[in-house]
């Protein structure tokens, strides 16, 4: 899934080139890293990208030959995944889907592939499987998965797969602290595995209007009317996440607890999770080392540009992002609110900065 807008990574992330098309703490862009870590388990020709029409130029620049399906408009993840499913079934009636966001960071690629293979085994048996990340802090920016550690089976690869009790929305801090203390809760990674047939059957069960639209799109694939029918039906679909629309209601859902160095790269403070800090806790990305001066500065995050010197004097816990037309400065505890700046610019009709 590569249709996200990445507003919390503004001003580096823009409408035409959101964060999945940027190298944020990685040698390649995040979408290239996502595809690259799947090999050799999943060949490139079996990887389908679903993205908005406005993202097509960036995808074609980076991945000119990749299989691509475009969404006529933004409709959240349930329509996105459903659209992928009907296209996959046209190529393979027994398709098993791995639904992966295009903008995550995963340090342990071999371990990740091992878990994918285990998830595929259970998905082929008719279950829905997700990866849950073992929490190491009371995070309020993620949804959680409450799982049953007593209802566990092992795949042929020796990976433990546990029953899901329920999916939990992003909690307040006190609740997140309780989840961490109690155990039995995992962060929802947003990665899911199921057969295309199982997914579409659940959409028919829980989202019947969406299912009807997807069936009409499926019938039009490969015909001269495909683009027109897709646009007409997709625009009518409810905007709903796959988590809320399907996962919270489905049965036979399992989760694999995962320790794979996962980070959803959700905001600028995430650079501190996989970047290299200096002795004062400052993390720098981009630019030239000689163009950054830090004096009595601690625990800051700097995304440097190529045009000028950046100097920090006597400041702590600050995020600085330098681009040719925008300089962002915010507290590390406010990085989740960067999207508010984007909303204000929309109100001011400053489209040239979006």
Image (tube, grey):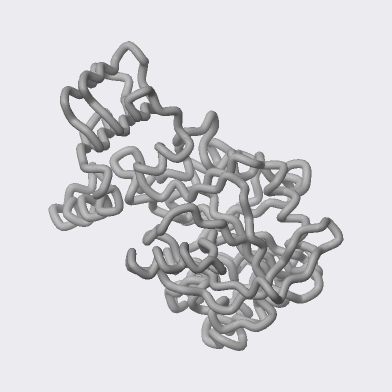
Determine the residue located farthest toward the top in the rendered image.
290
Can residue 79 be seen from the camera position used here? no
- Percent x, y of residue 293: 25, 16
> Residue 133 lies in what quarter of the image?
bottom right
Along the viewing direction, whichever of 170 and 104 lies nearer the viewer? 170
The location of residue 16, given as percent across then percent down, is 38, 45
**How many discs mark residues in the rendered view?**
0
Q: Residue at x 48, y 45 (%)?
A: 20
Residue 199, image quadrant: bottom right
Q: Is residue 200 above or below residue 335?
A: below
| Left or right of 173 on screen, residue 85 | right
| Residue 14 quadrant | top left
Task: Using residue 81 as the reference point, say whether residue 159 is left or right of it.
Answer: right
Up/down of 157 relative to 249, above or below: above
Find residue 140 and report its horizontal and vertical position in percent: 37, 61
Residue drawn at point x = 73 percent, y = 68 percent: 89
Placement of the N terminus among the 4 image quadrants: bottom right
Q: What residue is shown at x 13% (from left), y 53% (from top)?
A: 348
Of residues 221 and 176, the one nearer the viewer is 176
């Amino acid at each position: 899934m590569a249709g996200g807008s990445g507003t919390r990574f503004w001003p580096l992330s823009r409408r035409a080139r959101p964060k999945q098309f940027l190298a944020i703490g990685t040698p390649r862009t995040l979408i290239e890293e996502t595809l690259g870590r799947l090999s050799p388990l999943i060949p490139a020709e079996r990887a389908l990208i679903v993205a908005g029409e406005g993202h097509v130029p960036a995808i074609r620049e980076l991945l000119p030959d990749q299989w691509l399906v475009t969404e006529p408009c933004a409709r959240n993840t349930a329509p996105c995944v459903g659209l992928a499913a009907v296209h996959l079934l046209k190529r393979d009636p027994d398709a098993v889907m791995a639904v992966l966001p295009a903008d995550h960071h995963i340090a342990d690629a071999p371990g990740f592939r091992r878990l994918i293979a285990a998830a595929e085994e259970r998905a082929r048996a008719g279950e829905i499987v997700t990866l849950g990340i073992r929490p190491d802090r009371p995070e309020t920016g993620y949804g959680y998965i409450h799982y049953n550690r007593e209802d566990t089976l092992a795949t042929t690869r020796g990976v433990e797969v546990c029953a899901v009790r329920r999916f939990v929305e992003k909690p307040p801090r006190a609740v997140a602290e309780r989840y961490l203390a109690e155990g039995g809760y995992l962060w929802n990674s947003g990665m899911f595995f199921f057969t295309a047939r199982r997914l579409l059957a659940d959409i028919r069960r829980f989202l019947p209007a969406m299912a009807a639209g997807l069936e009409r799109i499926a019938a039009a694939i490969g015909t001269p009317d495909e683009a027109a029918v897709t646009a007409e039906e997709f625009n009518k679909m409810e905007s709903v996440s796959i988590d809320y629309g399907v996962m919270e209601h489905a049965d036979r859902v399992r989760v694999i607890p995962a320790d794979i160095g996962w980070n959803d790269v959700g905001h600028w403070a995430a650079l501190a999770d996989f970047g290299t800090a200096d002795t004062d806790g400052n993390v720098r990305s981009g630019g030239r080392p000689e163009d950054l001066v830090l004096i009595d500065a601690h625990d800051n995050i700097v995304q440097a540009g190529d045009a000028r010197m950046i100097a920090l004097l006597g400041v702590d816990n600050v995020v600085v992002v330098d681009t040719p037309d925008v300089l962002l400065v915010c507290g590390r505890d406010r990085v989740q609110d960067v999207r508010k700046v984007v909303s204000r610019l929309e109100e001011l009709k400053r489209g040239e900065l979006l």
